[in-house]
């Protein structure tokens, strides 16, 4: 009960932030009714999905300060568990998704235990490697469809058991619900014992250790929480796209995208990953859709995308949230 | 301050993008077809070519092309729909399946397209066709060759191009033809000389399914695979793969490679002075203009499967006429990939004309009944007619051989099917001295 209260309590934020959250929430709830078009709806779904990924990454990457670039492997585990169980045994989504989370958490312990002997860049490189190895295994493993991937059977009617709908509005509200669960969880997490321990570890590992914090165990726990978040998103991707393959669920570029959104938005802040996703996802999708098909402008959308990322990170290494805070302080 | 301005400006840009998101312009007498191709990213070059070919075909139908002897070139729009023009709306999926699916939804719901075409990458075609199937919107696929695509029992998906199983069977027909003396300019080769085969295929969906199919046909045609390997097309070095191939001493080396890896593989094999009698690539890298431009005379004797070779214009009049228009406008000849786009748009036009309606059900019926005669196609096919699975059963592939010409360049000659052969087959593969 205490935990639930903590999760729903945003009172330590400034008034402006709380008002912002309320306006944002009203917008999210009302969005499907404002008639923005189906493409904008798909962009919103991607935004919520990447916010979810980013919030997960933020536990270990933001609060824990460990640069983690292998989150895609857990997207893969989540999506493959849902897809394979559905194709092989017709297991409903609501059963297979929790199993996917369990497998992701179990796997993250196995990976995390040896990995957290490493620090800094070595840790970052190791996370990339484990993710690439898993992708290579799936690329060549015939039982799970190898590089050809897995197609989910299309169900005719709205089907809540298998999460299949014709209209994206259902998917939108579903991913929105997941988003809020994640947001409340993160709100609790940042105030939890583990949250404080992680920030201490980030600031000074030796000092943290001298105070009796089990550094490795803390990191493993945070890493597993992050993996669970990402696996949920992966499961969603499987039922939403109805097709998954190693290239779209386990690629290094996906890992980097997840970390980039959280870092660009502002790591170690509750709003950071959400702001990062709100900035990068629409930028990527709208620019791509608008300029991608234009003649004589090949690649211009990539250039604008990259330039904006560079401008933000050069101006304020703490990301967009850092810029907002800077302006706010100047205002006082 | 400047940065603040930039931030405000980009914010305004976004908001305007949001507001301006695909508004449905309903101009009269226009039939919108959504076309998804990889227009940026790794496959941008090929995607742009496909886009050009599709646009050219739409122009031929809409504006009439006097010099082209295909009925649709005299239509000036779709006759049964009161001369309505075809409008192609292009979207760039970058080779990403999820992006393709999102764009397909946007085309169907925001742009209100009558049907879809694309998407080149088989993986993207999978998600796009799943969206089309959900919404009951017809999709004609012009250029994805994964055999699985027409094995899914979809009701709204048709494919004009032959798929990889056709092409791999062609390869084994050619090998068999060699042993039977059917190949132009070559006496029958004893089968034991061609018994052992080795392949190296890239390891994504396409390459791995080619590998599987090669194994299957080898068994069926009585050949032995002595070495088979899958590799990463982005690998910076293929020395160990090339060594493994050379060590197997195969009579034939078979490949499924994209462009950069095909160049690397051939250069590596050349460096090792690899010897084999038969050197074949499954389209993609082997067929692209840059392949021949980069490797020049080094590929004398190399074979590639394709569906269109510009030499076909000698034996097929309409192919020559459309090719001339394409070359005049863009400076290149049509290739196997781009000619498939021509047929894709053409199939759409014929289907719409037959349906005489833009109602999805009417189009579905027209697709199932369509029969485009061979004479109307730029392809050397027997026509376009779909089976119950949506696969065109009248398509066939070609195998071309790069041959050194007198001026030191290479040209691609047709060697299979045997009745279309334009030059004597070079056997055995000359290799590199």
Image: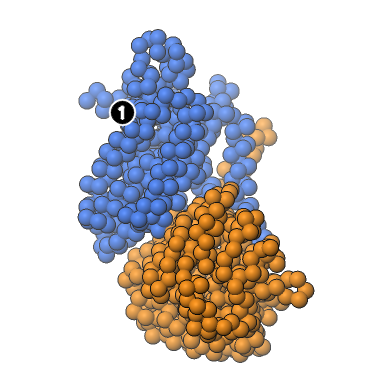
Q: Nearer the viewer, residue B185 or B3?
A: B185
> Farthest residue toward the right?
B407
Residue A38 horizontal/vertical position (percent): 43, 57
Q: In the image, is A50 to the left or to the right of B411?
A: left
Mark 1 closeness class: few <14, some 14–19, many ≥20 residues within 10 Å: many
* Vertical placement of residue B68 versus A92, above or below: below
Residue furthest top as drawn: A210
Observer able to see residue B288: yes
Q: Is A6 on the left or on the right of B257, as rendered?
A: left
Q: In the rendered image, which quarter contains the C terminus of chain B?
A: bottom right
Q: How is the image coloured?
A: by chain
Residue B294, percent from left and from top: 69, 62
Secondary element type, mark 1:
helix
Q: Residue at x 32, y 60 (%)?
A: A166
Can you give x and y, in whole percent of width and height, for residue B38 in the image?
54, 60
Say whether residue A325 is left or right of residue B151.
right
Which image quadrant for residue A37? bottom left
Asked which quadrant contains residue A169, the reply is bottom left
> Who's blue, chain-wise?
A
Residue B178 or residue A147, whichever sits in front: B178
**Which residue is under mark 1?**
A7
* Residue B421 in sight here: no
Residue at figure coordinates x 52%, y 67% from the top left: B252
Horizontal and vertical percent position of residue A109 = 33, 31
Q: Quadrant of the N terminus of chain B?
A: top right
Q: Which chain is orange?
A: B
Q: Chain of mark 1?
A: A
Q: Is residue B107 above or below residue A36?
A: below
């Amino acid at each position: 009960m205490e935990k639930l209260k903590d999760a729903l309590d945003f009172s330590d934020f400034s008034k402006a932030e709380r008002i912002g959250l309320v306006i944002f929430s009203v917008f999210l709830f009302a969005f499907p009714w404002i008639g923005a078009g189906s493409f904008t709806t798909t962009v919103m779904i991607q935004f919520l999905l990447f916010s979810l990924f980013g919030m997960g990454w933020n536990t270990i990457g933001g609060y824990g300060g460990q640069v983690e670039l292998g989150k895609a492997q857990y997207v893969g585990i989540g999506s493959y568990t849902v897809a394979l169980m559905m194709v092989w045994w017709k297991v409903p989504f609501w059963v297979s998704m929790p199993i996917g989370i369990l497998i992701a958490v179990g796997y993250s312990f196995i990976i995390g235990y040896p990995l957290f002997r490493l620090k800094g860049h070595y840790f970052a490189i190791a996370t990339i490697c484990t993710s690439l190895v898993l992708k290579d295994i799936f690329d060549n493993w015939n039982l799970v469809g190898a590089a050809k991937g897995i197609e989910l059977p299309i169900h005719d009617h709205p089907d809540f058991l298998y999460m299949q709908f014709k209209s994206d509005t259902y998917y939108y509200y579903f991913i929105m619900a997941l988003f809020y669960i994640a947001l409340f969880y993160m709100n609790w997490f940042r105030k939890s014992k583990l949250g404080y321990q992680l920030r201490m570890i980030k600031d000074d590992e030796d000092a943290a250790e001298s105070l009796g914090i089990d550094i490795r165990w803390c990191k493993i726990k945070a890493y597993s929480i992050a993996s669970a978040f990402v696996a949920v998103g992966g499961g969603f991707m499987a039922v939403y796209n109805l097709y998954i393959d190693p290239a779209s669920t386990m690629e290094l570029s996906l890992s980097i995208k997840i970390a980039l959104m959280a870092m660009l938005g502002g790591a170690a802040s509750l709003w950071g990953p959400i702001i990062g996703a709100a900035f990068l996802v629409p930028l990527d999708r709208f620019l791509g859709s608008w300029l991608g098909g234009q003649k004589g402008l090949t690649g211009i959308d990539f250039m604008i995308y990259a330039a904006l990322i560079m401008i933000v990170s050069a101006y304020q290494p703490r990301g967009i949230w850092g810029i907002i805070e800077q302006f706010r302080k100047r205002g006082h | 301050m400047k940065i603040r301005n930039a931030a405000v400006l980009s914010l305004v840009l976004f908001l305007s993008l949001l507001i301006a998101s695909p508004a449905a312009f309903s101009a009269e007498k226009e039939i919108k077809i959504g076309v998804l191709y990889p227009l940026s990213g790794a496959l941008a070059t090929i995607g742009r070519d496909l886009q050009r070919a599709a646009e050219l075909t739409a122009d031929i139908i809409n504006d009439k092309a006097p010099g082209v002897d295909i009925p649709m070139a005299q239509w000036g729009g779709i006759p049964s729909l009161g001369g309505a023009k075809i409008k192609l709306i292009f979207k760039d999926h970058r080779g990403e399946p999820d992006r393709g699916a999102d764009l397909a939804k946007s085309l169907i719901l925001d742009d209100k397209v009558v049907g879809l075409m694309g998407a080149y990458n088989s993986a993207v075609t999978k998600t796009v066709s799943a969206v089309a199937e959900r919404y009951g919107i017809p999709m004609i696929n012009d250029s994805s060759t994964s055999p699985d695509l027409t094995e899914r029992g979809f009701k709204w998906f048709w494919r004009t191009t032959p798929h990889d199983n056709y092409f791999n069977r062609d390869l084994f027909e050619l090998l068999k033809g060699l042993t039977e003396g059917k190949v132009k300019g070559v006496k029958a080769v004893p089968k034991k000389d061609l018994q052992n085969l080795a392949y190296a295929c890239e390891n994504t969906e396409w390459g791995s399914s080619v590998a599987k199919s090669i194994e299957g046909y080898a068994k069926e045609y009585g050949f032995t695979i002595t070495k088979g390997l899958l590799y990463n097309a982005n690998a910076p070095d293929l020395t160990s793969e090339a060594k493994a191939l050379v060590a197997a001493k195969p009579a034939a080396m078979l490949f499924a490679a994209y462009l950069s890896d095909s160049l690397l593989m051939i250069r590596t094999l050349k460096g090792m002075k690899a010897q084999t009698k038969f050197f074949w690539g499954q389209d993609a890298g082997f067929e692209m203009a840059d392949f021949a431009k980069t490797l020049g005379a080094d590929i004398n004797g190399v074979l590639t499967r394709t569906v269109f070779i510009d030499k076909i214009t000698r034996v097929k009049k309409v192919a020559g006429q459309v090719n001339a228009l394409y070359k005049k406008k863009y400076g290149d000849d049509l290739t196997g990939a781009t000619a498939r786009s021509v047929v894709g748009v053409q199939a759409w036009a014929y289907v719409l004309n037959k349906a005489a309606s833009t109602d999805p059900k009417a189009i579905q019926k027209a697709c199932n009944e369509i029969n485009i005669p061979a004479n109307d196609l730029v392809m050397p096919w027997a026509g376009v007619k779909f089976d119950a699975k949506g696969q065109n059963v009248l398509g066939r592939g070609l195998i071309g051989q790069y041959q050194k010409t007198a001026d030191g360049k290479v040209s691609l000659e047709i060697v299979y099917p045997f009745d279309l052969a334009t030059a004597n087959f070079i056997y055995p593969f000359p290799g590199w001295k």
